Image: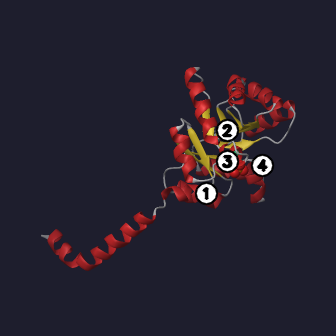
Amino acid sequence: MLLFLDTANLDEIREIAAWGVLDGITTNPSLVGKEKQDFKKLVQEICKIVSGPVSAEVVATDPEGMIREGRDIAKWAPNVIVKCPLTPAGLQACSTLSKDGIKVNVTLCFSTNQALLAARAGAYFVSPFVGRLDDINQDGIGLIEEISAMFAVQSIDTKVLAASIRNPVHITKAALAGADICTMPHKVFKQLVSHPLTDKGVESFLADWAKAKDSVGAIAAK
Ligand code: G3P
């Protein structure tokens, strides 16, 4: 399962990209709005930092507007992916843009049948929202599992991108449920690496090394 960051913040992206494990970026209008920067310039900057797919969302609500915006966004960088919502207009835009050879991430997916529609419209990614389903007492990871199983049975190429991730347990469960990609906030990405026993272990190894380093150094020099 590939690991994406769900952010438009350049500092957060640079920090995780430096680890060498960042496969791509997803943004949405709420995340871009927080950065108070020109949308196109921001996406182009992100696309320079990360060589993997970078999703940028249309804001028109009619198919013609979405197609127009999508064709424009697709020219911003070679690794940009156009994001469209899972509405009738979004499906129409996805269908047209996909036929043009533009990769589309169909977002705001909350059911298996919606995912099937996105796939039929030619989506490159479909993004089921795990956390927002959990929030209303529905099984977000269960949806990832069902979509992944259906795509496998039906030999559908559309990639399942688990979104609206709230905690590290979601990541493990999304991977086990068959998600191709998981996108997560910066805070959750950092939680993935952190473990108190790792910190404690490094501390005690270094303390032991400091005590023994003269004799160890002398042995190594022989
Ligand atoms: O980018 C879409 C999605 O990941 C949003 O997550 O936490 O706002 O439900 P959230």
Residue 1 appearing in the image: no
- The residues tagged by marks 1 and 2 sit, at their Cα atoms, a distance apart of 19 Å
Up the image or down, 172 lies above or below 37; here it is above
In the visual, does 13 lie left or right of 64? left
SS at mark 1? helix
CB at mark 3 closer than 8 A to ligand 1? yes
Q: Which mark is residue 29?
A: 4
- The reply to whether discs 2 and 4 touch (Cβ–Cβ < 8 Å) is no
Looking at the image, tell me whether mark 1 or mark 4 is earlier in sequence order. 4
- Coloring basis for residues: secondary structure
Q: Nearer the viewer, mark 3 or mark 2?
A: 3
User: What is the number of the mark on residue 36?
Assistant: none
Q: Between 74 and 174, which is closer to the camera in this rendering? A: 174
Give the mark nearer the N terminus: 1 vs 2.
Answer: 2
Q: Which residue is mark 2?
A: 128
The Cα atoms of the two marked residues, 1 and 3, are separated by 15 Å
| Contact, mark 1 vs mark 4 (Cβ under 8 Å) | no
Pointer 1: what residue? Answer: 186
Q: Residue at x 72, y 43 (%)?
A: 56
Q: Confirm if mark 4 falls within 8 A of ligand 1.
A: no
Quarter of the image with the C terminus is: bottom left
Counting residues from the start of the chain, the first of labels 3 and 4 encountered is: 4
Instruction: Tell me the SS state at disc 2.
Output: strand
